[in-house]
Structures are given as structure tokens and as C-alpha cells.
Image (cartoon, rainbow, N blue to C red):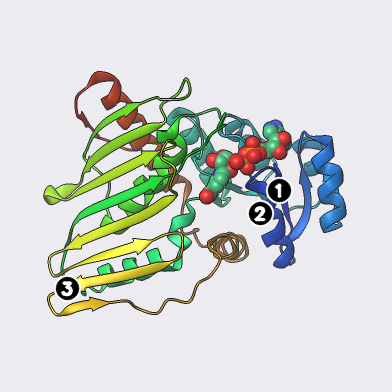
């Protein structure tokens, strides 16, 4: 049985606790907030610690999940990898590509799994879309339009919307096109906080193929949708209710998709990577590329011009 410890039990980390407990893999957790430690040790009946060092020193762990604010990912992931423990880091891997690269090199040097939480790859509707594209069912994909919009009234976090939110769609676009963008052009702005809270992004892939990404923390309706324009049909995906619709010459099709919890599929994938040594679905290198693209997007917005993405890693 694989033993996993979770670092951070906030808005998202508490879901990791629940899912890992359901999978019988939750061995321990830590949080710098003593109230959370007290609460979740009662809920899950596993030891809770006030920091990652204590958790590592007092528990036999095969894997660690890091679900803390992004600015802490590098230091915590370093500790986990240096202790020889397979590591899952929530997205984005780190807040800058320079530190992300160090984590990847260390994980590779030690032969450890480094997985990253780009969860939409585990969304059954997105997986169905990817299968249709792989089978070339509706011809080649030429254009993607991705929307992730939702009002966050009191959002105080350590990074802006591009690094926090658009990165999901950067990853999905890279995964669906099966390649990395060559250019990035973006405009971003801020209505509420000190960091950008809306972004409109154009990513240029090979062969004139393009992804348009629309992200904002401003508008009131929660929208998470994608539209994949293929030569023989348009496939629309709703990430929230895991629904997919295909519009083609003969009419519309709504395939039956069994809803599943993406986080559970993601954790099963991490556990299986620990057990078998096979790479996780989202590798550290994938995640680093997403960070590099996000950096190019911010650079493009600051300069007001398109940025060419040359070498990735
Ligand atoms: N994959 C997804 O869909 C998804 C969704 C939400 C958040 N996230 C990611 O999860 C991470 C956490 O986000 P959140 O919304 O849960 O944040 P949060 O602020 O709600 O929770 C962070 C928790 O980490 C704890 N913490 C902070 N520093 C710590 C440290 N050094 N050691 C131990 N605990 C520490 C805090 O006390 C808090 O309980 C972020 O990287 C975010 O991008 C991913």
C-alpha cells in the first residue's frame, strides 16, 4: 500500500485529503495553521504536523502532495525530493521557470516521480475530446477557444490570473494540439487587485493552428468551456458538467460520458506512477513548459507585442 502525506489543507488541499483517504493512501498531513491540523486529524484519523520537516521525519512516506500557495511550492517540493520521496505539486509547478527547472533536474537525477496538478487532463469530457482528436474522427484540429471565467470577490493570492488560472488552458491546449506553442500574444489588465485579473491570450502553434484563451476573475458567471474547431466538425466541451457536443454536417451528437471526479483519477495516476515507475500523465517537464508559456504571455502583455517561444527546456 502506498503511503502519501499532504502539505496544505486549505481550499484545495482538503480535497486531496478526502480523495487520498478514500483511496486508503492518506498516511499524514501538515499545515502551518494549528486549527486545521487539529480539525483534519480528527476528520481523517491520521497524524497531522505543523510543518513538512516534522511530517517527513515522523512518517514513512512514498509520496507527498503539495497543495500550498504557489510561492511556497519550490521550497516544499525541494524538501520532499531531497528526502527521496515521489512528489506531486499542485499547479503551477512554481511561480517561475528557473526554480521549476531545478525541481525537474533533481527529480530526474534521483529517479523520482514529479507530477503536477493539471487536472483537466483527467476530466472525462476532455479525455473524450482528446480521443476523438487522436482518432482524427472529425479531421484535423485547427483552432481552440478556451474560456475560464469566474468572479472572485476577495481573491488574495500570490500570483496573477495568468500563472494561476490561464495555465490550466495553456496545458489543455498543448495536450490537445500535441505540441508546444511557437508564439504568444496577450493583453492583460487589472480591475480589482494589484495583479492582473483578466487576460486574453493568443497562442500560435505550428501550421497556423491557434489557441485563444479567455480568463478573468471579474465576470459573475462561472464559465469553463472549450470549443475545438476541426475540419469536419466543432466539438464543444463544458468542463464543469463534463458534457461534450459535436456539431457536424449531418447534425449534432451528444456522446454519453460517465462523470468521474478528476481529482480521484489524478491521484490514482500519481499512485500508479509511484508503484510502477511509469511517468505520470502530467510530468514536471509538461508543467515547466506551461510556466514558460505563462511567462511569455506576461512578457507579451508588458511589451505590447508577440513573443516568440524558442527553446523550452
Ligand atoms: N488543480 C486545481 O484545480 C486547483 C484548484 C485550486 C487550487 N489549486 C492549487 O492548490 C494550491 C493551494 O491552493 P488553495 O486554494 O488550497 O490555497 P489556500 O490558501 O486555500 O490553502 C493553502 C493552505 O496551505 C497552508 N500552508 C501555507 N504555507 C504552508 C507551508 N509552508 N507548509 C504547510 N502548509 C502551508 C495554509 O495554512 C493553507 O491551509 C495552489 O497551488 C493552487 O494553485 C489547484
Q: Quadrant of the N terminus?
A: bottom right
Q: In which of the image's four quarters is ligand 1 placed? A: top right
Query: What residue sits right under mark 1 in the picture?
Result: 6
Query: What residue sits right under mark 3 in the picture?
Result: 248
In the depicted structure, whether residue 160 falls above or below residue 57: above
Queried on whether the Cβ of the residue with tag 3 lies below 8 angstroms from ligand 1, the answer reads no
Which residue is drawn at the image coordinates 75% and 58% (left, top)? 26
Relative placement, left or right, of 197 versus 58 is: left
Which residue is drawn at the image coordinates 82% and 42% (left, top)? 37
Mark 3 neighbour density, 10 Å: few (under 14) some (14–19) many (20 or more): some
Disc 2 element: helix
Relative placement, left or right, of 27 versus 137 is: right
In the depicted structure, whether residue 172 falls above or below residue 246: above
Disc 3 element: strand
In the depicted structure, whether residue 226 falls above or below residue 99: below
Q: Are marks 2 and 1 in contact (CB under 8 Å)?
A: yes
Task: Let me know if residue 176 appears in the view.
Answer: yes
As measured in the structure, the alpha-carbon distance from the residue carrying label 2 to the one carrying label 3 is 39 Å
As measured in the structure, the alpha-carbon distance from the residue carrying label 2 to the one carrying label 1 is 7 Å
Amino acid at each position: 500500500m502506498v503511503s502519501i502525506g499532504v502539505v496544505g489543507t486549505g481550499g484545495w488541499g482538503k480535497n486531496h485529503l478526502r480523495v487520498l483517504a478514500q483511496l486508503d493512501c492518506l498516511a499524514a498531513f501538515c499545515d502551518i495553521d494549528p486549527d486545521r491540523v487539529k480539525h483534519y486529524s480528527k476528520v481523517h484519523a491520521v497524524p497531522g504536523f505543523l510543518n513538512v520537516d516534522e511530517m517527513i521525519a515522523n512518517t514513512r512516506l512514498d509520496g507527498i502532495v503539495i497543495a500550498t500557495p504557489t510561492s511556497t511550492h519550490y521550497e516544499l517540493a525541494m524538501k520532499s525530493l531531497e528526502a527521496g520521496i515521489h512528489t506531486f505539486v499542485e499547479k503551477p509547478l512554481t511561480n517561475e521557470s528557473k526554480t521549476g527547472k531545478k525541481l525537474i533536474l533533481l527529480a530526474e537525477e534521483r529517479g523520482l516521480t514529479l507530477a503536477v496538478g493539471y487536472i483537466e487532463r483527467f476530466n472525462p469530457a476532455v479525455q473524450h475530446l482528446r480521443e476523438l482528436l487522436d482518432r482524427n474522427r472529425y479531421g484535423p484540429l485547427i483552432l481552440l477557444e478556451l474560456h475560464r471565467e469566474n468572479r472572485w470577490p476577495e481573491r488574495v493570492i500570490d500570483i496573477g490570473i495568468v500563472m494561476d488560472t490561464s495555465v490550466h488552458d495553456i496545458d489543455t491546449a498543448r495536450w490537445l494540439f500535441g505540441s508546444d506553442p511557437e508564439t504568444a500574444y496577450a493583453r492583460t489588465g487589472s480591475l480589482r487587485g494589484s495583479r492582473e485579473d483578466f487576460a486574453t491570450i493568443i497562442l500560435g502553434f505550428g501550421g497556423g493552428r491557434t489557441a485563444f484563451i479567455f480568463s478573468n476573475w471579474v465576470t459573475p458567471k462561472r464559465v469553463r468551456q472549450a470549443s475545438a474547431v476541426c475540419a469536419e466538425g466543432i466539438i464543444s466541451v463544458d468542463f464543469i458538467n463534463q458534457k461534450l457536443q459535436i456539431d457536424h454536417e449531418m447534425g449534432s451528437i451528444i456522446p454519453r460520458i460517465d462523470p468521474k471526479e478528476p481529482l480521484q483519477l489524478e491521484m490514482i495516476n500519481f499512485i500508479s506512477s509511484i508503484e510502477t515507475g511509469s511517468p505520470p500523465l502530467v510530468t514536471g517537464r509538461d508543467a515547466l513548459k506551461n510556466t514558460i508559456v505563462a511567462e511569455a504571455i506576461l512578457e507579451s502583455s508588458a511589451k505590447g507585442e508577440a513573443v516568440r517561444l524558442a527553446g523550452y527546456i
